[in-house]
Image (tube, rainbow, N blue to C red):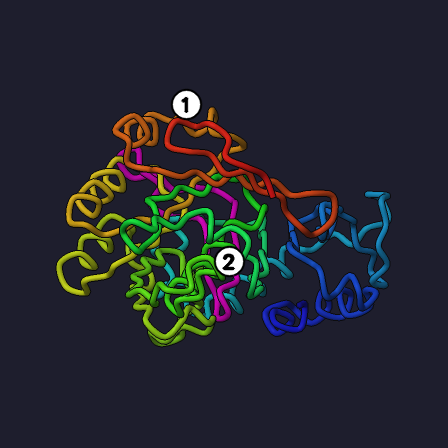
Amino acid sequence: MLATISHLLPQNIRFMLSELPPNVQASVEEIRVRESRPLEISWADRYAFISERGQMITQEALAYKPSRQDCQLLLEILTNHSLYTFEEELRRGYITVSGGHRVGLAGRTILDQGQVKQIRDVSSFNIRIAREIQGVGQEILPHLVDQSMGNIHHTLIISPPQQGKTTLIRDLARLISRGEWGARNSFLSGKKVGIVDERSELAACVKGVPRFDLGPRTDVLDGCPKAEGMMMMIRSLSPEVLIVDEIGRCEDAEAIHEAVHTGIRVLATAHGASYEDVRGRPVLRELMEAGVFMKYVILQRRKGASASFRILDHQGKSMGDG
């Protein structure tokens, strides 16, 4: 998978990573570039520092430490040498590049009336490599079907970061759009799916066209704030299933209430390690107490690359594991 993002890296760092073993190159999930600190990669719940010769090591002192020039060049490449055009992304602390890869940023923040206006002196980059893995939703989708309505239940997928929820929700969109519900539900047809892809990760759109396979009946609002995008979908695109990633703000909850009361089924994700974690967040607790979600999927990474899941009902009671 390194091949999909190598063109974004300064030449010296690109060379170091090209020396990694092929199996590691194929499974790298994150590359962390920090000024004057060790170059780091992570894969399959493991991490390593990288030496100047491209060797994986654990000793900090022997690792290559990117320079300020490395960081400046990386930022220029990521922004196509035009920081101004990426002003909004820089304010939010991330840049999404072609292919759906998201690069988190850290550095010195500039405030305006208590709000982050900009990040300057960017000194940390977390390059998260997006993957399309078809089929990961096949085992889960049958648990989410509401046979009486011929659609899915309102569902919230819960997991900590980097546990595969974006990969899962992308595949669920494809399956629902194609009508691939599983043998028990073969009588169901494909649904009109609307995706609000605020961070451009789910669809990896280029000039508005998804680069990931989301199914033939899927429409995408790319780079649009979730709450505003959900309302736009409701008003003008008549989806049968509305999909949003990483909800958590008050305006997200208001838009979800609107969707639910117009007969649209909602499939959303949220960060958390458990049902109890998510219930501790005020905005999500309100949705849960209102009985919006009828199914919950808890994801947890097993040792290695695969993930386990647990299905909960609307009261948070277990309905089965996988």
| Residue neighbourhood size for the residue with mark 2, other residues' Cα within 10 Å, grouped as few (<14), some (14–19), many (≥20) | many
The type of residue carrying mark 2 is Arg
Is 163 left, or right, of 277 in this rendering? right
The residue positioned farthest toward the left in the image shown:
235
What stretch of residues is rendered in magenta?
93-118
> Camera-side residue: 151 or 260?
151
Real-space Cα separation, disc 2 to disc 1, in angstroms: 27 Å
Location of residue 191 in the rendering, given as x and y in whole percent from the top left corner: 31, 64
Label 1: few (<14), some (14–19) or many (≥20) C-alpha neighbours in 10 Å: few
Say which residue label 2 marks: 102
Image side of residue 33 versus residue 59, left or right? left
**Residue, disc 1:** 280
Determine the residue positioned at 23% across, 53% down: 230
Question: Which of the 4 image quarters holds residue 61?
Answer: top right
Q: Quadrant of residue 155?
A: top left
Across the whole image, how many numbered discs are drawn on residues?
2
